[in-house]
Image: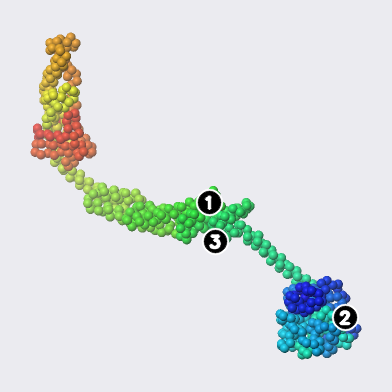
Amino acid sequence: MICVNCGKENKDGSKFCAFCGTPVAVVPVEAAPAEEQPVAEMPVEAAPAEEQPVAETPVETAPVEEQLVTEAPVEAAPAEEQPVAEMPVETAPTEQPFAGTPMQQMPQGEAVQGWQQPGAPMQQMPQGGAAQGWQQPGTPMQQMPQGGAAQGWQQPGTPMQQMPQGGAAQGWQQPGAPTQQMPQAGAAQGMPQTGMPAQNWQPAAVPPPVQNKKKGKAGLIIIIVLIVLLLAGGGVAAFLIFGNSPVKKIESAFASGDVYTATELFEKVKSEKDIEAVEELARDYAEQIKNNYINEEMDYEEAWDILSELKVSILKKDGRLEKIMDSVNYIMIGRSGYEAAEDYKEAGDYLSAWTCYEEVMEEDTLYYDKAQAAIEEVKGLYRQEALDDAQYYLDMEDYDMAKYVLEDALGELYEDAELSDKLESVEEAIAEAEAQAAAQAAAQAAEGMKEISGTWKMEIEMGPYLAGELGEGFEDFDGSFVIGLVMEFTQDGHYKMYVDEDSFRENFDQWVDSFVDYSVEMMYEVFASQGISRSEADELVEESFGSTMEEYLRDMMGYYLDADYLLDEMKSSGSYTLDGNKICWDGDSYNYDLFTVTGDTLNIDAPAGMEGVEIFPGVTYPLVFNRVQQDEVMP
């Protein structure tokens, strides 16, 4: 037995639905359609009735088998309740309202749905609420559900629906027709219970048998519902297919900033198309990480870790990622340089600050403009520092140092107008100072040349030097060899140095005589040590060299020591200038000696660091000359 309310199947003979509590009517599951036959043969001409809204119109119901008691076909409730929109139902015209229709007789036997046998106790309402066609005792009449009259009921206060053409509906008796017997399957719908007010028991119009037109509308509704279900199912399928795809999950992981989940999910991606899609997502995410670092939404370590994770997982050997990582690294270096630059600027090291500010990359939008502004600031500070230093040295009349400071600054600030103007003024000051210095130097030089001009002479003992040059065995030889070194200066800046030739030759011959005598005695001692007497030694020398021992030694001295050669070696001449206490030789300002003139004494000494240097063999600084003649002796 099928419940007309919930559509669920109950056991045969059940009075109430075991699922919803509604009284159950006998409705075969599958029944052949029966032809509609009029219950009575009396012709009926009725005015058309207004269409009444019906709450629930069965989409398509199976016709009920004809019962033995009546020939009227009974339409059963649908086997399964479908939610259907409210539709107006056309009712067939009837001859007169059903108010005057005689009450149908209660079928014999037990009470059925919607009936109460006279004198029998009132049946209890099933739990869950009043079923169709029932009223709980002692309760006010239930209100009709919204949407229209339910089966077998009439909303209070509404006009009675007209009887549909074609025969008596379920639970109704046409006027003048014999009373139909109630089907044994249960109480007919829409009959008043005994003892209940008649106005609450007016039967409601039952929809006529479904016409083809109705079936078409119901079918259209079913098709629409199926389409909606298919579309909904397609959306779910699309969600299951695309929403749960690894690419979408990886995209969601990137969106939430979970790179490690994204890299784990990437291991499950197999198709080349999905791999390319994920790689593009990873590149975009890498760009986002770079931008987050630039905007200081994350620090360098966090950004570098994420990019490194992408490099070893999704974007191996990816050129775009390599560029992004290089950019992040250079941005980090630039920002470190910016911090160092701030410290350098605070310490007054403007050049170092400038250099560090320039490390900030143009791509670093957060710091680049600040760095450029800071560069202009330190340039100005460096410029002013150079100008102040140059002025300090100018005030100290250290023109060379002032010029050096400005030229060094211009090496950094090319063609800077302020520095160039200052350098020009320094060069003018230098030229003026040089002119003044030259004039003063010329005056001093003229005075000095006048003072130094003339002939100066000094005697130099060369004996110890020559003894040392003779070698081993002559250490005790103390022969004297004095030479006279002469210096001549003119006021026009020329000089000449030489040895007094007469005194040189005289002293040289004396020294040779002393050396020969000393050497002969030394040779005799050598022969004596070998047991050879003086006479025997003379004979041996005579036999060997054809001369005496003294002659032999004089020939040897003449061979090794040439007086003319020594005289030429001690001659020199050239030009000189005086620069304060400096004698600059041959126009070379770096080749100079220091001099002082005290009365008739000229002292020439080596510059600092040159002490002890030989002027020529055996002659070292200082040289002390005595004036020989005031007037010039040179032509």
Q: Label 1: how many residues lie within 10 Å, few (<14), some (14-19) or many (20+)?
A: some
Q: Which residue is mark 3?
A: 256
Q: Secondary structure at mark 3?
A: loop
Q: Quadrant of residue 27?
A: bottom right
Q: Label 3: how many residues lie within 10 Å, few (<14), some (14-19) or many (20+)?
A: few
**First of labels 1, 2 by sequence position:** 2
Q: How far apart are labels 1 and 2 at the CA level?
A: 87 Å
**First of labels 3, 2 by sequence position:** 2
Residue type pointed to by label 3: Ser
**First of labels 3, 1 by sequence position:** 3
Residue occupying the point 86% across, 75% down: 65
320 or 103: nearer the viewer: 103
Residue type pointed to by label 2: Thr
Query: Can you see residue 295?
Result: no
Q: Quadrant of the C terminus?
A: top left
Position of 443 relative to 139 (above/below)? above
Residue 140, position as x, y percentages in the image: 71, 88
Q: Secondary structure at mark 1?
A: helix
Residue 397, position as x, y percentages in the image: 22, 50
Residue occupying the point 35% across, 52% down: 352
Tell me, for residue 70, which label it has, or none.
Answer: 2
For discs 1 and 2, the disc positioned in front in the rendered view: 2
Residue occupying the point 32% across, 49% down: 408
Position of 616 relative to 34 (above/below)? above
Q: Quadrant of residue 141?
A: bottom right
Tell me, for residue 344, which label it has, or none.
Answer: none
318 or 30: nearer the viewer: 30
Q: Is residue 66 left or right of residue 274?
A: right
Residue occupying the point 16% across, 41% down: 581
Q: Given contact means CB atoms under 8 Å apart, are the residues at marks 1 and 2 in contact?
A: no
Q: Secondary structure at mark 2?
A: loop
